[in-house]
Amino acid sequence: MKILMLGWELPPHNSGGLGVACYQLCKSLANSGCDIEFILPYDANHDIDFMTVTPAHPQGVEEIIKSGIAYDSYKYIYSDGTEQWVDIFGQQLAYEKSVDCMVDRMEFDVIHAHDWLTFRAAIRAKAKSNKPMILHIHSLEHDRAGGQLGNPLVHEIEYIAMMMADRIIAVSNHTKKAIMREYDIPADKIDVVHNSIDPNMLEPLDGENAYQYIEKMKQHGYKVVVNVGRLTIQKGLMNLLLATKEVVAREPKTLLLIVGTGEQYYELIETAASLGISKNVIFTGFLRGKQWRDVFAISDLFVMPSVSEPFGLTPLEAVGYGTPSLISRQSGVSEVLANCLKVDFWDVDRMANDIVAVVRSPALRDELHRNAYQEYQKLSWNNAAQQLIQRYSEYTNGVPI
């Protein structure tokens, strides 16, 4: 079974969970016998041997370099040595045109496209090949805009693509309901395939923790709360800061580590200052590798207060590195992770109370993590892969949906 997979990122050149989910899902699909060609909008070494990774280069372009850690801009290097910077919409158009040219020389049974940045290219591939198009929704513009309409162009791309899709995959029931509500898509056109995690794929902790200064503070009685993710309105970090103000008033020896970057970076720093909690809030910036792993290991509680989170892999990663979680009920991961604290994103008082409870009780922290880790050890991407293979087979065997 040959799959044309259209995606926007893969580790280690990813800005968030989308690349991680695509990587782990494709690995499980490949282990089950799928032949995958994954088309990316940039050129990089991913050290992947279980599928073919191909950059979509416009004509005359020798190399595409992704700039920054988010979906912002790309540098084109042409064969004559000239360079050009392209914004995200220009890059999406170039990707669409390149995939359109590449489809003519490819053999595949199904088109599988991840999120709006690849949807126009998927529509082109479907029109040319007459192959079924499956859209995988990891996040909607409604989510990224914090429950608002967001960018109307992105909204239109999502709407048209979902109307034209043969099948839609949602990463949670939360996301399925949002698709039905925002785009009036019938329920029977949407399958829920939860994201997961492969415990064997998390790189283990090694040696001393990178945050020795925080370890020293913990020796003096400090507790550490962490959030890891993009600093955007979707992630609900303003409410986390408001909750932290209440936590610090009751437990002054509490530190909040905010890991990541995004358009709210400076706004959040100013808000922490205006709330009088700057000395308790540490902004680390974007982290990878050992520093990223160690920030979980040194923390007493991971908090994900997202306004609307289609899934959210980070709480599962936190459990893998020894930290229990407090997550918003407005998240997909809350559907699969039972042993964690859950709160509505807007309930600042409840959020503060739950954080204080864990900060004050090491026994509660340890019990939460112990039970969550038992769940974590049973998780695997294999179930998600098998659900998708069943859908693929219905097309390749000529069985109508």
Image (tube, rainbow, N blue to C red):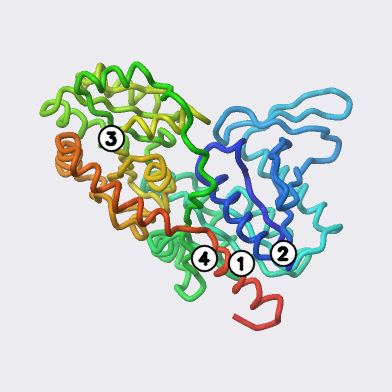
Indicate left or right for 90 with 331 as reference. right
Name the residue carrying label 3. Answer: 300
- Nearer to me, 52 or 72: 52
Q: Secondary structure at mark 1?
A: helix
* Secondary structure beneath label 2: helix
Asked whether the residues under the numbered discs 2 and 1 touch, taking CB atoms below 8 Å apart as contact, a structural biologist would say yes
Residue 326, placed above or below residue 72: below
- Real-space CA distance between mark 2 and mark 1, rounded to the nearest whole angstrom: 9 Å
In the rendered image, which residue does mark 2 sit on? Answer: 126
Spatial separation of the CA atoms under disc 3 and disc 4: 31 Å
Residue that mark 4 sits on: 383
Instruction: Look at label 3 and name its amino acid.
Output: Asp
Residue furthest out toward the right: 80
Cα–Cα span, label 4 and label 1: 27 Å
* Quadrant location of the C terminus in the rendered image: bottom right
Which label is found at residue 164? 1
Residue 225 is situated, as x and y percent measured from the top left of the image, at 28, 32
